[in-house]
Image: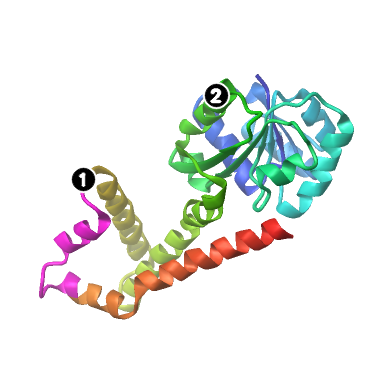
Amino acid sequence: MKLGFIGAGEMGGAIIRGLLASGWKAADILASVHTPESANRLCNTLGIAAYTDNLRVMQAADRLFLAVKPAQMPEILAQLASAQLAPKPLISMALGWTVEKIQRVLPGWPVVRIMPNTPLALGEGVTLFEFSSQVSAQDRQEIRALFNCMGKTFEIPPALFDIATALSGSGPAFVYDFIDALASAAQAQGMEEGTARQLAVQTVLGAAKMVGKEDVSPAQLARKVATPGGCTAAGMEVLISSDFKEVVRETLAATARKAQQVAAD
């Protein structure tokens, strides 16, 4: 089975690297990119076949991934429509492009809307799914299996896809910023930069694993660490008085609103 990628930038490249790391053969992955330089780089670094010809990949792929920016989608979908190919599973990760919106151009095609995040390149990703009714049960299972090898997968109702995208798709950026804030705060108290970053990264990593393994809520875990009258409780009081949770709520809300605006354009 051939997997074809139209676009292999940040997200498309992360998926390809994740597939290769999970055991997928480079000979079964091909991609189309903008420039010969990018194509050569993919060939040399990942060992996959890469071209600057979208149609070649569209024709050769058994399953076609659209890993392009939302603004490029009309052009790519028009190419697909004019190519008059037999419908095949079409997997899109373009923000704001719903299954319904894609099927206006390609009616009857089996469309899969996904929203992955970049940690899947390390096998720790999250991928959201929405399937059109034309996607067979076997294809659903097999497509999800591709991503189950790179993390966890979730089928999300269309009405919740934007907020789920804000949480898991954009969420890594918010976590990175929090890690940077922790490290910067330690540096401000005199800690060396490299040590501060390592401590912040390992602390967040360990805390996340605790949440995944303990049969209690994150809030309960926080209370277990924050002994009344202790130093952790003193820090938690600052977070509470700053309305940290409200800041996070508005962060996700703003992200979801932007996704909805993109979909409406």
- Whether residue 246 appears in this view of the structure is yes
Q: Residue at x 68, y 29 (%)?
A: 89
Badge 1 amino acid: Asp
Disc 2 packing (10 Å; few <14; some 14–19; many ≥20): few
Badge 2 amino acid: Glu
Task: Judge whether 24 appears above or below 162 on screen.
Answer: above
Task: Judge whether 24 appears above or below 70 on screen.
Answer: above
Image quadrant where residue 84 sits: top right
State the residue in front, 246 or 50. Answer: 246
Image coordinates for residue 171, horizontal then vertical, percent: 47, 57
State the residue in front, 194 or 251. Answer: 251
Q: CA distance from mark 2 to mark 1?
A: 31 Å
Element type at mark 1: loop
Q: What numbered label is drawn on residue 142?
A: 2
Is label 2 in contact with label 1 (beta carbons under 8 Å)? Answer: no
Stretch in magenta: 214-233
Q: Residue at x 34, y 79 (%)?
A: 242
Question: Does residue 256 appear left or right of residue 4 in this picture?
Answer: left
Q: What numbered label is drawn on residue 114?
A: none
Q: Residue at x 77, y 30 (%)?
A: 57
Disc 1 packing (10 Å; few <14; some 14–19; many ≥20): few
User: What count of labels does the image hold?
Assistant: 2
Q: Which residue is mark 1?
A: 215
Which residue sits furthest right?
82
Image quadrant where residue 229 sits: bottom left
Is 218 part of what is drawn in magenta?
Answer: yes
Q: Residue at x 67, y 42 (%)?
A: 99
